Image (tube, grey):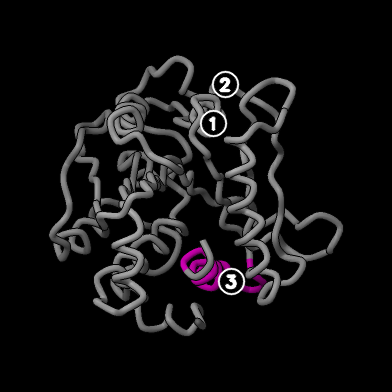
Amino acid sequence: MNYLELHKTNIESMVQGRYLNLEILEPILEKLNNVHVIGKSGLKKPIYEVNFGTGKTKVLLWSQMHGNESTTTKAILDFFNFLNSNSNLSNTFLSSFTFKFIPMLTPDGADLYTRENANKVDLNRDFLNLSQPESILLFDVFTNFKPDFCYNLHDQRTIFGAGDSGKPATVSFLAPSYNQDCDYNEVRLKAVNVIVAINKELQKHIKGQVGRFDDSFNRNCVGDTFQSLNVPTILFEAGHYPNDYQREETRKYIYSFS
C-alpha cells in the first residue's frame, strides 16, 4: 500500500501552515459525528475528544499539548478523513482498533501560539503536580479509557538533526523511560517495537532523517508517567523537511507512517 499516495486523497484542505487554533479546528470537527466536549481549558474554551472504531486494541492520541505544535494535529485531521473514507483499509482499521483522539489539548496555548497554556504552564511538565485543568483532563481520560497504547504527538524545532547523518530530523521518536535507570521492561519494549516498525518504513522515504529523542527520565512528563503506569507510550516529534517551513511535507509522513 502506498500510504503517501493515499494521503493525497485524504488531506484536510481546510487547514494549512503552522498556526492552528480552535477557530480553525471547530468547523472541521463539526463535519464529524463522533465528537464530544470533554472539558474546558483554563480560559474555559472547549476541549474536544473524537472517537473512531470498535476494535480490541485501544489507542489514545493527543496533540497540541503545546499550542504552537500543530503539525501532528494536521496529520490527525487527515487521518480522520481516511477513517471516514469507507474503504476496505479504513474499515479494517476501524474493526481492529478503538481510537480516542484529543486533537487540541490546550486551545488557549494554540490561540496564543505558545508552548505554554494560559497560566504559563508547560503541560508536559505538569504530570507530577497535575495543577492544570488540561493535565487533569488528559489524566482522567487515560484512567477511564484504559488504553493499550498512547501516542504523545508533538513538533520539534527546525534546528534538530538526525544523529550524525547531517540531515534534518523530519520525524523523531522516543519510547519514554519508566524509571531513573532508563531500563527496558515488557511495556517499554512494546513501544520500542512500534517505533522500529515505523522507522523501517520511513527509511524507505526519508533515509537518514529519523531521529531519536533523549530518554532521560522525568516524572513530570506525561510520556514517562504513562509508561511508568504500564501503558506503552510513544513520543512523536514532527520536525523539519528541507525547505518545508510550513510542515506540509512532514505532515504527510506523520499521517502515512505513524
In magenta, the rendered stretch is 241-255
Provide residue 233's location: percent of width, then percent of height.
52, 40
Q: What element carries label 1?
A: helix
Q: Residue at x 48, y 48 (%)?
A: 153
Mark nearer the viewer, 2 or 3: 2
The reply to whether callout 3 and callout 1 are in contact (CB within 8 Å) is: no
Q: In the rendered image of this protein, does residue 119 appear above or below residue 46?
A: above
Among numbered discs 1 and 2, the one appearing first in the sequence: 2
Q: Is residue 60 visible?
A: yes
Residue 237: x percent and y percent?
Answer: 58, 51
Q: Distance between the residues labelled 2 and 3?
A: 34 Å
- Please name the amino acid that badge 3 sits on: Asp
Q: Is mark 2 on a helix, strand or loop?
A: loop
Asked if residue 242 is among those painted magenta in the image, a careful observer would answer yes
Task: Say which of 82 and 110 sits in front.
Answer: 82
Q: Residues within 10 Å of mark 1 (few under 14, many from 20)?
A: many
The local crowd at label 2, few if under 14, some if 14 to 19, many if 20 or more residues have their Cα within 10 Å, is many
Marks 2,3: beta carbons within 8 A? no
Where does residue 258 sit, x and y in percent of width and height? 51, 61
Q: Can you see residue 246?
A: no
Residue kind at label 2, given as amino acid type: Arg
Three-letter amino acid code of the residue under disc 1 = Gln
| Residue depicted at x 45% and y 57% | 72
Q: Which residue lies furthest to the right in this view?
A: 164
Which numbered disc, 2 or 3, marks the residue that appears first in the sequence?
2
Task: Say above or below: 242 vs 6.
Answer: above
Q: How many labels does the image show?
A: 3
Point out the tag, 3 or 1, that comes first from the N-terminus. 1
Q: Mark 3 points at which residue?
A: 244
Q: Name the residue under label 1.
A: 227
Asked if residue 41 lies left or right of residue 258, the reply is left
Residue 219, label in figure: 2
